[in-house]
Amino acid sequence: MTFRNKALAIAMTAAASVAFTAPAMARDTIQIAGSSTVLPFSSIVAEEFGNSFPQFNTPVVGSGGSGGGLRQFCQGVGAHTIDIANASRPIRPAELENCKENGVTEVIEVMFGYDGIVFASRSDSGSFALEPHHVFQAGAAQVPQNGEMVANPFTRWSQIDSTLPDQEIVLIIPGSNHGTREVYEETVVHPGCDSFDEVKAMDRDAKTAFCNAIRTDGRVVEIAGDYTETLARLDSQRDALGVFGLSFYDQNRDRLQVATVSGVVPSLETIGSGEYPVSRPLFFYIKNQHVGVIPGLMEYAQYFLSEEVGGMGSPLEDAGLIPMDMAERDEITSAVMSRTLMD
């Protein structure tokens, strides 16, 4: 059976289900918001879903960052709240608790693939071979020197390591509303910070506070908007080094160059194999209390998870998604379609 015929078969089954089981509703279009990393993938799926399932409206997909999308998601239940939150990190326990406090007591977690976080700069700037401790030292408020913590003295990358470009430190990172920021801190900044003996001697809370503190002298720029804003900063500042999702870099590789991290070039292959150290799973979260009320939610999830949409050789892989293997896909699809809820 062709992909088109499979989609139509699912659609006909869904239409019959909706016709006989769905209660009256105030809204008939799926509303989605959240991660700017997930945005291009979700937008592709929404458009193709609308084309393949004529009885459902094309879902409306917005951005706002993982944290922003989850805040909207957790505001409550009803047509005035979004149905799906996209996230480039797992939902936090405090966010899930906030959901429950606001009546969102039934949440379905959907992991749909992987992405990498890359460091990219203009193609006419210096070439970077980064280690986690380089990134920490470039962006930290304080750094260890001679057994003491001192205000960050570094103004050029070559001062940190002579093998790095002799150019001004300008680091463009995602704001705290982005899931990319959390992964950036956990997989790059924290390991770099923890490589120093002075930090290893700290207790956990002091270490976290120290490692997360960023310099405020203008050399680290936090971006609350999406990656297009980061790209605009790189366009206007030759020395800037920006943090992106791999998929966004792939869409702009004609104007950017990517840094290695720990000697590994980020790619679909090195992220899929686990060789590249800065990768993460991607998610969306479904409000189960909207299933059967807002048409098409489970059909959208099933379509998103299909091999034809998100597997090898799929439109999402073409857009930069690292697909799951078949065993993982089957397990997740089974749990989602049985509407398994988070605790």
Image (cartoon, grey):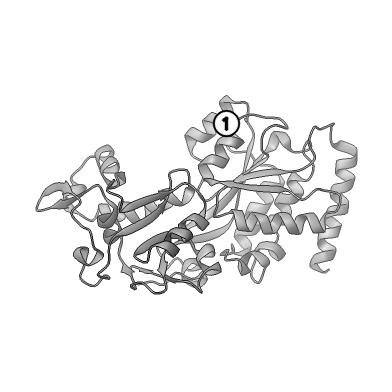
Q: Residue at x 70, y 47 (%)?
A: 60
Taking the image as drawn, is residue 278 in sight? Answer: no
Q: Kindly identify which residue carries mark 1.
A: 99
Find residue 273 and report its horizontal and vertical position in percent: 48, 69
Of the pair 238 and 261, the residue shown nearer to us = 238
Give the residue displayed 90% in from the left and 41% down from the top: 19
Residue at the image point whose x is 85% and y is 31% from the top: 24
Compared to 273, does 23 lie above or below?
A: above
Q: Residue 272: where, in percent of width, then height?
A: 51, 67
Q: Is residue 325 left or right of residue 138?
A: right
Identify the residue at horizontal 78%, vertical 36% (top origin): 27
**Location of residue 181 with respect to 73 vertically, above or below:** below
In the image, taking residue 3 as reference, residue 176 lies left or right, namely left
Q: Is residue 34 above or below residue 276?
A: above
Mark 1 closeness class: few <14, some 14–19, many ≥20 residues within 10 Å:
many
Name the image quarter holding residue 31: top right
In percent of width and height, residue 156 lies at 23, 63
Which amino acid lies under the numbered mark 1 shown in the image of this protein? Cys
Give the quadrant of residue 322: bottom right
**Is residue 341 found left or right of 157 in the rendered image?**
right
